Image: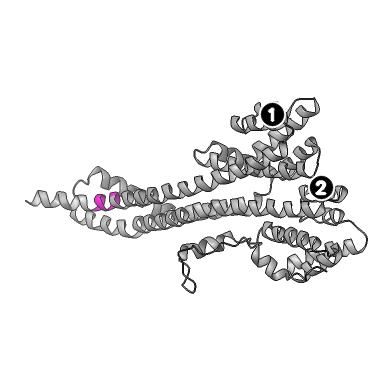
Amino acid sequence: MSQPIDIKALRKSHSTEPTPEAGTAAGQPVPFMKQLEALLSKDLTIFGSAFPDKSKESFYLELGSLMDAGLDIRTALQLIASEQPKKAARAILSVVLEKVVNGSSLSAAIRENKNFTPYEYFTVEIGEETGKLNAVLQQLSIYYKARIRQRRQIIGALTYPLIVLSVAFCSVFFMMNYVVPMFADVFKRFGGELPFLTRQVLNISHFMQAAAGKISIALLLLIALIAFNRHKPGYKKYKDLLFQKTPVVKNIVTKIYLARFASTLQLLLSAKVPLVQALSLSRQVSGFYPLEQALSQMEADILKGMPLYETMATKKVFPSKMVALVKVGEEVNELELFFKNLAERYAEDLDYQTTQLSKFIEPAIIIILGLVVGMVLIAMYLPMFNMGNTIQ
């Protein structure tokens, strides 16, 4: 008889929450930046899904492990639902459990729930039909764990630069609205012609004072506009196209979605999903407009008899090295293995690139901030030096 499973211990042992660095001794406080990165890495549900990627990763891992241990699906679902720490997630799984108890398959139960994607219920359905449900559930857990890791890589790379940029903006705003005007009053009392640099800084200060309210309102409106339109196809399309044309960012963003695409295809092909259907499911969960357009055209090309690598070669979103590996995979009939290797390679590249980007951006921002503050100070003190030379 199998040993009973402690689901809390299972969840803790496979947790993807950030852990303190090896250099941080037990009991010592975690550095502020690490705490902030951990906070930003959490799945917040104010504007998002009630059952985010972190919950899905745990759900599929726990369900697969419990079924591997010999529990039937109803008992496993009941145990997982009862152990959910969040009320929203508990309610979602309770609905899934109720449908399964009433005779529905797991794939049919999650198909009727808006918190699950077509990619998930089609993959689960294939696992049920082939008798490999437990393996598919484990693969889904790995897939969502990789998604979480990729998101945290980006958050880790951008957290510090964004904080420094915010501090820099607030510092310049304060100087232009409060410090520079005080110098301007002194210059008026002394009279005389001001240096060119000083005049330009004073003009910027006057503009910011006059337009401060309008700028604040415009920023709030922009944030509200993004919040209300972030799920609309038009917004996603132009956002993704902008990312694809932005230097440095385009390389990282493209690799994130190529890694997800490779991981998705590897999972679907391992579940014996036909290639055309696998591409269709990958397109539905891609979330990246250029890749979605490419996959849509690839479906039509493959239905016409074109090999996968040939249709990929005609799409700019796929790098030539990826196409070459896919060609070899098709020739030896090992596409699943090659897509697995591609997903791992892109994950490693992302880890390296985000680390290097963070190391480059941090000093660059500090240098730029120092130059801006130094220019303002020089502009303010330059008239005083001139006046000192005139008096002599």
Which quadrant holds residue 264? top right
Q: Residue furthest right?
A: 103
Q: Residue furthest bottom?
A: 27
Q: Quadrant of the N terminus?
A: bottom right
On residue 190, the disc is none
Q: Amino acid at mark 2?
A: Phe
- Read off the residue under disc 2: 122
- Read off the residue under disc 1: 309
- Residue 269, horizontal then vertical, whole percent: 76, 41
Position of residue 109 in the picture relative to residue 375 (left or right): right
**Disc 1 + disc 2, Cβ < 8 Å:** no
Position of residue 357 in the picture relative to residue 66 (left or right): left
Separation of disc 1 and disc 2 at Cα? 24 Å
- Residue 241, horizontal then vertical, whole percent: 60, 38
Q: Which residues are magenta?
A: 375-380
Of the two numbered discs 1 and 2 in the rendering, the one whose residue sits closer to the viewer: 1
Question: Foreground residue, 30 or 249?
Answer: 30
The residue lying at 72 percent from left, 36 percent from top is 335
The residue lying at 67 percent from left, 59 percent from top is 54
- Residue 65, horizontal then vertical, whole percent: 76, 61
Point out the tag, 1 or 2, that comes first from the N-terminus: 2
Question: Foreground residue, 233 or 354?
Answer: 354
Q: Amino acid at mark 1?
A: Tyr
